[in-house]
Amino acid sequence: MLTVDNVAPGWEPVREAFVSNLESGLDRGAGVAVMHRGKLVVDLMGGHRDKHGDVPYGPDALQVVFSTTKGITALAVAMCVERGLIDYDATVATYWPEFAAHGKQAITVAQLLSHRGGLYTVDGPMTLPEALDWGTVTSRLADTKPMFEPGSTHGYHALTYGWLGGELVRRVTGKSLGDFVQENIVAPLGVELWIGLPAEQEHRVAHLMAHPIPSFPPEIAKFMLEHGGPGSLGEKALSLNGAFGPGAFNKPEVHAAQIPGANAITNARSLATIYAATFGEVNGVRLLKEETRRLATASVTPEGEIDAILGHPTVFAKGYMLNSTRNNYGGPDGYGHDGAGGSVACAVPSRGLAVSYVMNTMLTAYDGDPRRESYVNAAVRCADAA
């Protein structure tokens, strides 16, 4: 069942949670990793990576992690801020003049990254081939009128966040977001993560599957349909007005494109390593100075504000989601991002902790994915006992 089983003494509860989820069938193929005080203390993989159960989810498996990608994009922007290339308080149009169209000239970088720009989709329909072309999407976003008054509230930019943040990086560095990440995050740390997968790596990608949608109480089912069902704002945001339909993220052409809000392809140990390097050194590498990290992870969401797309409170910093009653990131200073179906990567600097979980079997949950919760909670208990 376990294809990678590296657990330091004292961290066995994470393994126990992982085995339990595999044995119960909640996980079919997955990886969990934990970094503590700069050291990899948990590296687990198990199950199978194909839909027939024939190919083990082994050490070479790679996984699409959906919106967990957003934390990597937020990090890339923060690194540009640290280098003096971007100012969170400056307007987006300072770096991307075309963005000013249709009343967007006053939107700041901080507002854009915290989902306060009103650009959760584009005007008009979009096809998948159009959505896979960077210039097409960014031009359409620049020419889109905000769908709510910028700065008045926040609404989850489920896919558009990545192109918006990624275009800022491209404008100030001359590099695509994927290339910037490879050169400035992946290579220094020696990890594996792509936003825009090379064709020679495609055979390693685990096939995405889904558990049947469970029965929810009528009031919850109604809420979920209103906020994510056909014709809802959530459906428009999550599909980019229909461009990304069922099964899209199993397609090689989607893996090969750069979709920095949703298509990072990686593994758990790489994500945990990256997050650990945002607040401390990992093998001599630290990605952000403490001042920059605190700036990037400071909340931009008024307390209790309801997400206009998701319909419940969410808390955003400059791209990162923050620990809250709905997002358990391991402590009051926790930050990170989770992804559709269950994946997560987060950091808890006060505990010296970074946790990541990737999986090929998506689960629809209302109060938080139970697998994700079990791994984060077990890691916190072990860190506190260390």
Image (cartoon, rainbow, N blue to C red):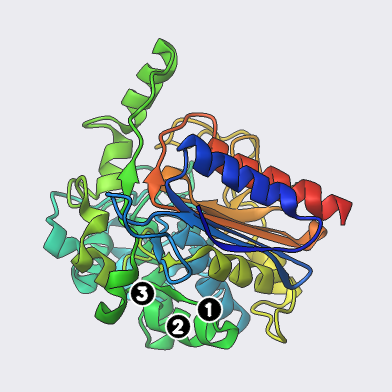
Q: Nearer the viewer, mark 1 or mark 2?
A: 1
Q: Secondary structure at mark 1?
A: loop
Q: Amino acid at mark 1?
A: Val
Query: On the image, numbered disc 2 is attached to which residue?
Result: 182
Q: Nearer the viewer, residue 352 or 127?
A: 352
| Residue 99 sits above or below residue 128 on the image | below
Picture mark count: 3
Q: Amino acid at mark 2?
A: Gln
| Residue 333 seen in the current view | no
Q: CA distance from mark 1 to mark 2?
A: 9 Å
**Residue located 50% across and 35% down the image:** 24
Q: Quadrant of the C terminus?
A: bottom right
Query: On the image, numbered disc 1 is attached to which residue?
Result: 191
Q: CA distance from mark 3 to mark 2?
A: 23 Å
Q: Residue 235 appears at what percent x and percent y?
A: 28, 38
Q: Residue 160 appears at what percent x and percent y?
A: 34, 57
Quarter of the image for residue 249 reads: bottom left
Q: Secondary structure at mark 3?
A: loop
Q: Residue 162 appears at what percent x and percent y?
A: 38, 63
Query: On the image, numbered disc 3 is attached to which residue?
Result: 96
